[in-house]
């Protein structure tokens, strides 16, 4: 099989199954594992997939710039946001991460809800202007890609916060690679914010499930739970549960809220 044909086969398999197991593909194509791994390395170098132990998974499209992300999986993000908003308890203090999913979460919070909201995202803070919630905005160096404050000043301010819940945005959720994002400073800030809350809930719209970004935020078992836009029987969700993850599926959560 020509190299170009193998590449097309691998990318199509990735689109279909959301993962490639090098050993299985090698057997299927009657090729050596080394040949498949070499193809995967080359595709990864072009940014077409992400290598993981034993094979490859999709690269998260959520690493695109902020403006582009507003148009990715919008309906899926709304489902996740609605399910996450249902977890917020009146009278509590919550931390909202930056990103388009947490911005959607704000839209699902009642405007009269009695909560204190801490965020390092100026866009999230601005969306809360018409809400009765107390809003605390953490300042620092603006990381424009995600429209959040990062760096030493932001980290120091975050270290003084104590909260009940942190709603964490990531760009990849994978059973082995964990919860990942595209920038090391942003990943560090997310870890600090998580450490300041009693509960951390990671939010995962459909394009993030099974995808991997370069920088680890936390392992799957390092958060209270995941709010995912995935079917209960989804095989990736099953793998996440096997790693110790508590999962709230967005569809079932919204259904319960409507009863």
Image (cartoon, rainbow, N blue to C red):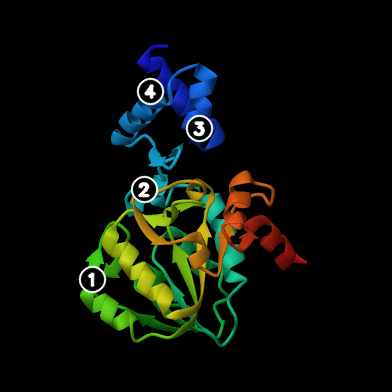
Closest to the observer, 58 or 30: 30
Q: Position of residue 14 (x, y in %)?
A: 49, 32
- Among the two numbered marks 1 and 3 on one chain, the one whose residue lies closer to the N terminus: 3
Quadrant for residue 190, please give it.
bottom left
User: Mark 1 = which residue?
Assistant: 151
Q: Are marks 1 and 3 in contact (CB under 8 Å)?
A: no
**Mark linked to residue 68:** 2
User: Mark 4 = which residue?
Assistant: 35
Q: Position of residue 192 (x, y in %)?
A: 36, 74
Tell me if residue 121 can be seen.
no
SS for callout 4: helix
Q: Which residue shows up at 38% across the image and 29% down it? A: 37
Closest to the observer, 157 or 34: 34
Q: Which residue shows up at 43% across the image and 42% down it? A: 53
- Among the two numbered marks 1 and 4 on one chain, the one whose residue lies closer to the N terminus: 4
Q: CA distance from mark 2 to mark 4?
A: 35 Å
Q: Nearer the viewer, mark 1 or mark 2?
A: 1
Residue lying furthest top: 1
- Among the two numbered marks 2 and 4 on one chain, the one whose residue lies closer to the N terminus: 4
Q: Nearer the viewer, mark 3 or mark 2?
A: 3
């Amino acid at each position: 099989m020509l190299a170009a044909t193998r590449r097309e086969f691998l990318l199509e398999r990735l689109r279909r199954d959301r993962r490639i197991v090098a050993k299985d593909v090698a057997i299927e194509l009657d090729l050596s594992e080394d040949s498949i791994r070499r193809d995967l390395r080359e595709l990864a170098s072009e940014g077409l997939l992400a290598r993981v132990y034993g094979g490859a998974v999709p690269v998260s499209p959520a690493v695109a710039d902020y403006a582009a992300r507003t148009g990715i999986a919008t309906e899926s993000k709304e489902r996740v946001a609605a399910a996450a908003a249902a977890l917020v308890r009146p009278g509590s203090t919550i931390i909202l991460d930056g990103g388009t999913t947490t911005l959607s979460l704000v839209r699902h919070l009642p405007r009269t809800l009695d909560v204190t909201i801490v965020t390092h995202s100026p866009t999230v803070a601005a969306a809360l202007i018409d809400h009765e919630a107390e809003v605390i905005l953490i300042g620092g160096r603006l990381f424009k890609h995600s429209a959040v404050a990062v760096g030493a000043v932001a980290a120091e301010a975050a270290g003084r916060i104590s909260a009940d819940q942190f709603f964490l945005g990531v760009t990849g959720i994978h059973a082995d690679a964990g919860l990942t994002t595209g920038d090391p400073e942003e990943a560090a800030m997310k870890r600090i914010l998580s450490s300041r809350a009693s509960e951390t809930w990671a939010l995962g719209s459909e394009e993030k499930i099974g995808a991997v970004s370069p920088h680890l935020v936390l392992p799957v078992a390092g958060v209270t739970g995941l709010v995912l836009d995935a079917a209960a029987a989804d095989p990736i969700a099953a793998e996440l549960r096997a790693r110790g993850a508590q999962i709230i599926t967005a569809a079932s959560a919204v259904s319960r809220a409507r009863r």
